[in-house]
Amino acid sequence: MTAADLPGLLPDMLPRLWAFALRIAGDQHDAEDLVQRACVRALERAHQLQPGTAPLSWMFSIVHTTWINELRARSVRKRSSMDWDDDFLENVADPTGETPETQLMNGQIIEAVERLPEAQRVVMLLVAVEGLSYQEAADALEVPIGTVMSRLSRARQAIGARFAARGDATPAPARRKDSIA
């Protein structure tokens, strides 16, 4: 791939870049701005794309770096708007027609992922949601593959512990009766 190929590849990448940006930013407008800034940055620096590097991983890296820079800038300005916009989710049509129980479980999973520390959340999104390999995620985040594996493991443990804690809320005698029956 050459720098000249990037403008032709970007349109196909936009849906995945926007979905990733929405997940890390948590706000539709921030995600749109984030993708726009990342695309401009990528086009300005297309010459830096190394041969053999997956363009999508490279773009995820730029989106992530741009977001981290935005968080730092917000911290300096003392304002942050990282709350998830539930109104946006309610306006998106559900193509699968899931049951209310499934929707509730999905909401709980999203909430659990949102509560993860930033580093773990980003790795979880890249690997579990975007389908990147550990190596691709490591390349996108510019960290060793072991760091990706460690962060992902801690993220999974935290989410598992969160759901296990909910299951432990059931009184012990009730669980014994159910397990005997």
Image: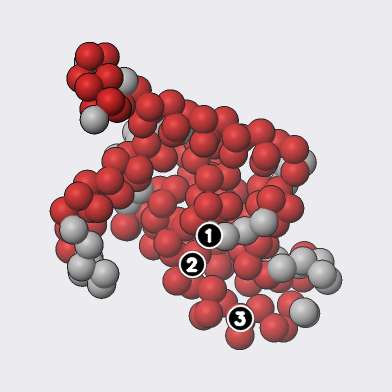
What residue do we see at 67% from left, 41% from top? 148
Quadrant in which residue 3 is drawn: bottom right
User: Is label 1 or label 3 in front?
Assistant: 1
Amino acid marked by disc 3: Leu
User: Is label 2 or label 3 in front?
Assistant: 2
Q: Nearer the viewer, residue 31 or 133?
A: 133
User: Mark 1 or mark 2, which is nearer the start of the sequence?
Assistant: 2
SS class of the residue under badge 3? helix
Which circle marks residue 16 in the picture? 2
Q: Are marks 2 and 1 in contact (CB under 8 Å)?
A: yes
As drawn, 27 above or below 38:
above
**Quadrant in which the C terminus is drawn:** top left
User: Mark 3 or mark 2, which is nearer the start of the sequence?
Assistant: 3
What residue do we see at 82% from left, 70% from top? 52
Q: Can residue 88 be seen?
A: no
**Image x and y of residue 6, in percent:** 66, 78
**Image x and y of residue 126, in percent:** 56, 53
Amino acid marked by disc 1: Glu
Side of 111 relative to 153 (left or right)? left
**Quadrant in which the N terminus is drawn:** bottom right
SS class of the residue under badge 1? loop
Q: Residues within 10 Å of mark 2 (few under 14, many from 20)?
A: some
As drawn, 134 above or below 117:
below
Task: State the separation of the CA atoms marked 2 and 1.
Answer: 8 Å
Side of 142 relative to 131 (left or right)? right
Q: Which residue is mark 1?
A: 130
Amino acid marked by disc 2: Arg
Q: Which residue is mark 3?
A: 9
Q: Nearer the viewer, residue 78 or 55?
A: 55
